[in-house]
Amino acid sequence: MKVRGAVLASVGGPLEVLDLELDPPGPGELLVRVGATGLCHSDLSVIDGSRLRPLPMVLGHEAAGEVVETGPGAEFSVGDHVVLSFVPACGSCRRCVAGRPALCEPGAAANRDGTLLGGGRRWRLPDGTRPHHHLGVSGFAEHTVVSEKSATRIPASLPFDVAALFGCAVLTGAGAAFHSASVVPGDRVAVFGLGGVGLAALLAARVAGASQLVAVDLVAHKRALARRLGASHEVAGGPDAVEAVRELTGGGADKVIDTTGVPAVLEQAYLATAAGGTTVAVGLPHPDRTVALPALSLVAEERTLKGSYLGSCVPRRDVPRFIGLYEAGRLPVHELLSGRLEPDRLNEGFARLASGEAVRQVVVW
């Protein structure tokens, strides 16, 4: 079928909305009419070359839509509304069997190679070139083909522009607070970086019962939004942030979540963590970057530094749970939306994201 999709041809962009041919779904695959797709820093990192991916590629990894066709053997039905997550978990590798689908080995290989979980590509340009898939989703298109392992059913009553955020921002941020940091009632929590992921982490830490919530960011309007969403304190990002967090929390936060992907900020997040506390790294830095930390503190202060990918979530368990919290008014994900875009304004949207002006924008097809 013919569809429009946003293709990145080379590092640095721009994204071009082109006419594409989309092959039908194969075994265990779904054809999804895309309702909305979020603009995320993980897309931006492919555009600017921080995360090297095979090009050309149809970008977009945080999406929701409606199933309009199923491939042989698929367990979904036409008309199902779905959220798409960016790790297609096979369900049978050693990581999946251990309950850690975010680390699915075949899923990681497919994402690295720009294919679907089964190894194929479904896109085709008029000259015969086959663009790659972005993290098994490629949501910047009117329709997309995905492995059903990337999809989770959702209530049809949930608007697609809100639903899309559950595929990345909410899974990654809320999951980091609930699962990776294991926030419990009474914890003093600090979040460095207040984009969609950081604010979702803050919302979840509030649900989990944090007694203090310190929101850290360079951008004043993001700190103001964090206060409106429940942060008890705000701190301007920069060289004085560590001292400010430690002073506010009486010696350091019990749980600190860094969503920036900036090694220097991760170092700050670690230094802002109390003895016995946990620092969680969520953002994705350039693969060549390293961090320098006081090694003695890991032992002498029984400190924990851990990574969190996809919020350490199991999407088919956690997406319905998080949606339930949203429907109950406890996880107001809609507050993260900065705006809705037409497809031809994608490049403008990513410029706003890069500048810090926007939190979470969605493109609506």
Image (tube, grey):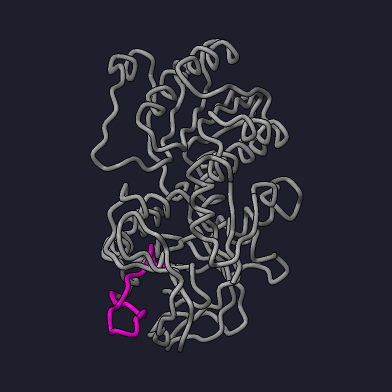
Identify the residue at horizontal 54%, vertical 50% (top origin): 169
In the rendered structure, the answer to whether residue 302 lies left or right of residue 53 reads right
Identify the residue at horizontal 28%, vertical 79% (top origin): 129
Q: Which residues are magenta?
A: 119-136
> Farthest left residue?
288
Q: Residue 223 at x, y = what percent?
A: 63, 30
Q: Residue 172 at x, y = what percent?
A: 50, 48
**Of 160 and 281, the residue lying toward us:** 160
Image quadrant holding the N terminus, namely: bottom left
Identify the residue at horizontal 28%, vertical 65% (top origin): 55
Residue 309 in the magenta stretch? The answer is: no
- Residue 365: which quarter of the image? bottom right
Query: In this picture, is 108 found above or below 185?
Result: below
Q: Residue 267 at x, y = what percent?
A: 37, 24
In the rendered structure, the answer to whether residue 186 lies left or right of residue 216 reads right
Q: Residue 94 at x, y = what percent?
A: 29, 58
Task: Assign the magenta stretch its main secondary structure.
Answer: loop
**Of 91 and 204, the residue lying toward us:** 204
- Residue 287: which quarter of the image? top left
Residue 125 in the magenta stretch? The answer is: yes
**Of 131 and 280, the residue lying toward us:** 131
Identify the residue at horizontal 40%, vertical 85% (top origin): 21
Query: In this picture, is 189 found above or below 260?
Result: above
Query: In this picture, is 269 found above or below 18?
Result: above
